[in-house]
Amino acid sequence: MPHDDFRDEIDLIYMKPLENGLLPGEVILLDWLNGKNFMKATFPLYFEYDYGIDALRSAENLIKENYLEQATIYESLPHFKVAELKEILKHHNLKVSGKKAVLVDRIKEEIPLADLQHHIVDTTLKLTSKGEDVFKKYYYIIPSHKSSSRDGIYYPASAIRFVKQSNHTPSNSEISWGLYTRAKSRYERERNFGLLTIVLINMANQLYNEEDYEHAHNYYLHAFILSTSGLHNGFIIEDPENISPMPTSKRLNQLIEILKLNSNDLKWIFNKSWVELKNTLPHHALDAETCFNCLLAHIEEDEDKFRSLVKNFFNIQTQINETGVSTNEQVYPDIADEKSTPQTSNQPYEQNEKALPKKELVKNLLMSMHSDFIYMVEGGLYKSNEPNQYSAITQTGIFAYSYQKGKLIELEQTHWKKITRASIDFRAMSTLLALNGKVYKIINNSKKVLRTAEEKCNTNIEKQERKWHQKIVGFRTGKAWKMVTAILIYIFLVGTSVDALTEENDNLTDVANTEDVMAETDTEPKNSSNGDGADPNKKDEEELKAAEEEEAEEQKEQEEKYKKEAEEQAQAEKERKEKEAEEKAQAEKEKAEQEAKEKAEAEAAEKKKNETNATLTRVIDGDTIEVSMDGKTEDVRLLLIDTPETVHPSEPVQPYGPEATQFVKDTLSGEEVRVKVGSEERDNYGRLLAYVFIDGETIQEKLLEKGLARTAYLYNDLTMLDEFHAAQQKAIDSGKGVWSIDGYAHKDHDHGYHFEEEHEPEPEPEEPSNDGLLYDPFGPDRDCGDFPDHASAQAFFEAAGGPANDPHDLNRDTDGIACDSLQ
């Protein structure tokens, strides 16, 4: 629940439930939650401080009472941030350019719902039909919240009261217009011309938004004439530098274009507005011609020209009139002396009506100076000697001023967004608010200032809470000698006050006796007033001096404290940045690990893609099997390996061939396997070229690890070549199987195994001439890898009897060309 301290500052109408049982703040919360992710929601402070509700508890209740429900993933997408949508598209290698609506449509069209569920864990909330009924019934609460005027006229509480007082169901336009009309009448009556100008502009803005352009143009002109009149809230602006129009030039230009007005049209409309408004005003700083020329300069956004016109007119008009008052220093009739002669108007003001209080004047000045004004507090810059200090609390920051001779002099300013360190010290008579080392002294509304600062600042505000007695001067530091001194001073001050009161009741006899005693002392008669010969005035001065010294010491201690706080905050900021850097590095590391994991999963998924379950029906030899898949029987040639021959029609059974065949039978018989066809589906014999998986591992890897096969035929799918090389290397390192016979197996070659049984040597034939050949064509067996280029391999092939005879198996495809791989 909100803090009790703030309850008395919240409009009571927000504490009364509506007919459906919801509080007005909960209706606003219902709209705020629509489209939000409840698990990630950070509630604005205005729910607690302005509307008096516990946002989290109320949100849970709205969901429980079925005003809100979870939206689907597709319904949630429009409420995602653009960066989040782009991250989803980027993850799926999709185009990330375009506006938000385009990104949402692309995700819906290109990414399956099942894939989106991996990215979107929590969806947003959406209104139920029950929630939509709330907005239909209380249609005026949300617009008044979103369009709340800074002048405190049109906002939810005022809209609710207006509807209750209406004898029909007013539209939102009627509500805001009615509230502005009431305020306009009140400000005209009270002569708050600064606020009246703001109301006229708000009314003009509403008319413009409703496309009532002619009336909007008239209201903007009235606001301009009034803003250049020199009239403010209770006084007349004397300095021409302080006469400035409200920022309406852009809108006036738009209306001139819409209404197609030429200079004559504009002059005619201006003169009409001038006559309508001028007769209701007690004063105007300019004449009609100068005011119109200033309007033209304002429309052209020529500030220098506007300022020059005003100054020139003031210089011409600065002359003493018949009443002895200069024409540019006139005051309202109620402020003028008896000799002043007020101007004639159709609505004369009563002579005895009092001017506005100084606080109201300052507040109205601040509102005219700050378009984002929120409220005013008494007090300004701490330890400043400037008089009459006030501070404006705005949406931008805090601005301290001194009010002197009808003008505001700026002392200091601090913007909320730039604050990096802040603290507040609640004292008995004032509160010290330290922002980035600048100290503001707040006399009233200190808790309200604290709430605003907490809402607007990007940093925590350290609060120095004091017990009641610790807020009193002399008791703040807790030092014993200071407290004793303070007690004595306070006792003396109380005693002096009592003596002053009782002295008035002394009779004449007491006075005479006192005079006699004073006469007897002859010198320094005042010393006898307290009976101890001491001068009370001197004591007062000494005690006041002691109090001032104590205050100065406290200020010094406070400054040292602020300095220490600044150093601590600087250190904390340094540690925070270091921590952020560590967290960022850790997050990047985790992101990289996650990406690697996702990549591995994607690769694994890719490997499983296009796989088909099959059952072994026959083992032909170590690298060829027969399976039943998709309702038919297929011969499958195992990709990337070659086992010794056992069933070749023109080759004998080679060593480790039978072992390879038997191993495949033992491993795959009766088992269901997965067959993944390679990029080239079949070989010249019509066999499927594939990887065959059993228990998550290929049969190829199992054969290679046991030394029953070698890698070969690398002209097809090479997806798993690295894994096969790794398995093969284990057998090579341990000398298993085919690798136990020197020169028998060669990895990655296509010319089979080479093994000859020992036999009696035959007489060597006469060596032929080997001119131009690298090797003896009738010598040891040669592979394509023994030749540097195709020409030397072709010459060797032909010298050995090719293409009719190919003892070195250099032309396996029988096309008459040796070692195709060297071309």
Image: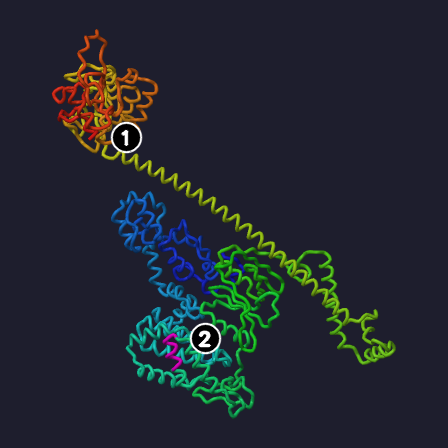
Question: What's the amino acid at mark 1?
Answer: Met
Location of mark 2 (residue): 195
- From what the image shows, is residue 230 above or below residue 709? below
Query: Residue 41: x and y, percent?
Result: 41, 52
Screen quadrant of the C terminus = top left
Front-most of residues 484 and 315? 315
Front-most of residues 375 and 94? 94
Q: Is residue 298 magenta?
A: yes
- From what the image shows, is residue 115 above or below residue 15? above
| Magenta-highlighted residues | 293-301
Q: Earlier in the sequence, mark 1 or mark 2?
A: 2
Instruction: Provide the major secondary structure of the magenta segment.
Output: helix
Q: Are marks 1 and 2 in contact (CB under 8 Å)?
A: no
**Res 594 visible:** yes
Q: Is residue 21 magenta?
A: no
Disc 1 crowd rating (10 Å Cα; few below 14, some 14-19, many 20+) is some
Indicate the quadrant where residue 475 lies: bottom right
**Res 21 visible:** no
Indicate the quadrant where residue 661 lies: top left
Location of mark 1 (residue): 720
Query: Residue 448: x and y, percent?
Result: 52, 63
Distance Cα–Cα, label 1 vs label 2: 80 Å
**Residue at image location 25% in from the left, 18% down from the top:** 660
Spot the residue most to the right: 520
Disc 2 crowd rating (10 Å Cα; few below 14, some 14-19, many 20+) is many
Task: Left or right? Give the position of 678 relative to 336.
Answer: left
Task: Tell me the mark number nearer the camera, choosing from 1 and 2.
Answer: 1
